[in-house]
Every structure is written in structure tokens, then in C-alpha cells.
Amino acid sequence: MNFAEAAYLALDSLRNNRLRSWLTILGILIGIAAIVSLISAGRGSEIQIKKRIETLGTNIISIYSRRPPPRKPGERRGISKGLILDDLIYLKRLEGVKNISPEISVASFVLAGKEESEASVYGVSSAYPEIRNLEIEKGKFFTSLDTAHWLKVAVLGSNVANELFPEQEAIGKKLNINNHYFTVCGVLSPKGQMWHYDFDQQVYIPDSTAYRRLTGDEKVRRIIIQTRDAEKAKSLVPLIEKSLLQRHQGVENFRVRSQEEILETISQVSRTFTILLAAIAGISLLVGGIGIMNIMLVSVTERYREIGIRKAVGARKRDILSQFLVESVVLSLVGGFCGIILGIIIAKIISLLGKWVFTIPIIAIILPFLFSTIIGLFFGLYPARKASSLDPVEALRYQ
């Protein structure tokens, strides 16, 4: 008996027991649908997060101020002020640096007449909008000339502009920051929030103005470097770490992170969770496989006389084995195919609800088909061997 004949007999048997067959298929279908939808959703969310990070700027290296780790026994350290504005002058000279900006955090209140906003105020350089991919909706961003003269000019996030100047033009208006009056020179286009950082709820002023007129402290919260390309970003990270460690007298009171490193970490976490969830979903495949074995054993028992007759007229052991094995695989593959279709539909719905990219990785199609075939073979092997091993005389006597 060839495969085509075995497949035909298997499908004929499934048609004769439709309800039982579909109930058996259901276990495989649910497991496969869960795996397809979870892999798709995991990949789609990963792409969406990466896109959101890339909106913060490309080829970015961030240097954060932090407390130094505890001193090791016998370790010698100098005295360091932490990240300061002078570090920017040195870092700007490194090869491959395209733009650089500090982020000087200003503890402040922001007022405009009777209106008040809970905005965060940051002192940044004139290159900040290019580094962070910020777009100006109205007016302009302050220039390097404004920075050089410590001018009191400010650029507002879209939410801040709406809070302080509702239903009126913000450009040219006065803004009170810590009892210093700033002139609004620009309003940013809406950009949204990324984790705890809300670009629409920020006020940006020249870094020199923040230092000279508001804080009087040369310490910076963070330094952001934009490199000329991704390769430069990778090679610059160890150089920056080594150079800053020397400048800070061996005190490691900073942390350097490249955008590529953050993206890689997110990818690893996303893949780990996707694999974990898919493995949990795979448990239902195991249950479905047990269901196939159970129904195939019932089928063998019901068809003892049929098996006996076939053996009596010359059917070989391998013919009986292949017939029941193919029947088991067909059950599993039908469940797998229907599960893939259902999984794609569920993945599309999840992507619409989550507002992320809908994508079906090729592995989300190949893997279920492999699983379906393996499950059909594995759980169908025992019933098929049992059927092929029946004695024809005993099978014909069975009532």
C-alpha cells in the first residue's frame, strides 16, 4: 500500500466519524493557534518597541550619572565631581561623534500668568532636536548663538504649550521658571511618551542658561552622544568608558549605554518571554497528542474485524501500520492547518488591539507543521503498531 492509498483510507475513516475526529483535532488546533498567535504577538511587540526607541534618535550613546560602586579593599580613588559640562568639551573631540548634548535637570515650577504646568525643565544644547528626532511645530529651536549668550529662551512640549497658553499662540509669550522670565521661541510637535519620559511634558532651555542662571551647578544628569553611524557607536562605548574613568580619577560614577545594547537587551527579553509562553501553549499540544492516541486506540478496537479481514486477504504488517499511522498524522495535520489559520486571525486581532505591527514570522508557520507531524507520528505509533501486530484469527473472532 502506497502513501496515497493509506491517506485515502485515513480520510475516509475520518469522514465516517466526523464529530469524534473534530473533537480530537480540537486539542491540536488550540495548541497550534496559541503558539502561532504568541510568536506573532511577541515579534510584533518587539518591532513596535524598537521603533519607539528609534524615535528617540539613531546611533545614540547615553552616559548616565550614578553613584560609584563601593570601594574595594586596597583600591585607590581620586576625587571626582561626577558628570560635568567640561566632560562634553572632551567627548566632543572623539572621532565619530556627530552631535552631543547634556541634559541638565532643573528642579523648578513653570508658570505663565495664572496658568501652571508640572513640566520638567532640561538644559540642553542646540543640537538636541537633531539627536532626539524632535520636530518643531511652531517657531524654532534655540541656536548655538543663544546658548553662547545664556539667553532666556525656551522651547515647549506640545502638552505644556496647551496647559500654559490654552487657545492662544505661545510663541513670543513670557514664561516664569524659578522666578526667571523666559521667552517662548518654539513649540514641539507631539511625540508621546517612552517609558517614564514624556517629550510633550518638557521645557527645554539652553544648557548654559540652566547652569549660569538657574542651577549654578556644572553637574549634568546625562550626556547624549549621536555618532555618525552604528559601527562608530559600538566602538566608541569602551573608549568613552576608559577616557571618562581617567578624567574622573578612577571613580566610576557614570554608566555608558549604547542604543544598540538597549535594543539587543529588549530583543533577548522579548524572545525569552515568547519562548516561555509558546512552551506553556505547547502543553495543550501534548494534551491534544494524548487525545489522538486515545481516539486511535478506540479506532483500532472498533476495527478488529476489518484488520483481521485485511490480513486474511494478504495485507502485510507494514500496510496496517502505515494506514493507522497516516490516519493519526492526518488528524494532527488537519488540526495544525486549522490552528495556523486561527492563530493568524488571533494575532491580527491582538495587533489591532495592541496597536503594533502585524507580522507572522516564517518560524510561526514552519514550527506548527513540524509539531503537528511529530505529534501525529509519536502518538499514533503505539496504536498503529498494536493494530499491525494483531493476529488475524483472533481479530476475526472479535465481536
Image: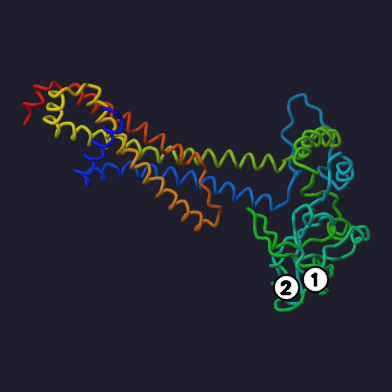
Q: Secondary structure at mark 1?
A: strand
Answer left or right for 282 relative to 291.
right
Q: Are marks 2 and 1 in contact (CB under 8 Å)?
A: yes
| 334, 223: nearer the viewer | 334
Answer with the quarter of the image where residue 215 lies: bottom right
Q: Residues within 10 Å of mark 2 (few under 14, many from 20)?
A: many
Disc on res. 263: none
Quadrant in which the N terminus is drawn = top left
Q: Which of pointers 2 and 1 lies earlier in the amino acid sequence?
A: 2
> Given the image, on which type of amino acid does mark 1 rest?
Leu
Mark 2 and mark 1: span between their CA atoms?
9 Å
Compared with 37, 390 (above or below) is above
Q: Secondary structure at mark 2?
A: helix
Answer left or right for 370 relative to 222.
left
Position of residue 252 measured from the top left corner of the image (x, y, whole percent):
77, 35
Position of residue 369 measured from the top left corner of the image (x, y, whole percent):
41, 37
Residue at 73 percent across and 48 percent down: it is: 58
Disc 2 target residue: 164
| 153, 394: nearer the viewer | 394
| 185, 364: nearer the viewer | 364
Disc 1 target residue: 175
Number of residue marks: 2
The colour scheme used to paint the residues is: rainbow
| 226, 200: nearer the viewer | 226
Position of residue 184 measured from the top left corner of the image (x, y, whole percent):
81, 69
Residue at 81 percent across and 57 percent down: it is: 123
> Given the image, on which type of amino acid does mark 2 rest?
Leu
Position of residue 48 measured from the top left corner of the image (x, y, whole percent):
59, 51
Quadrant in which the C terminus is drawn = top left
Compared with 111, 91 (above or below) is above
Residue at 53 percent across and 49 percent down: it is: 359
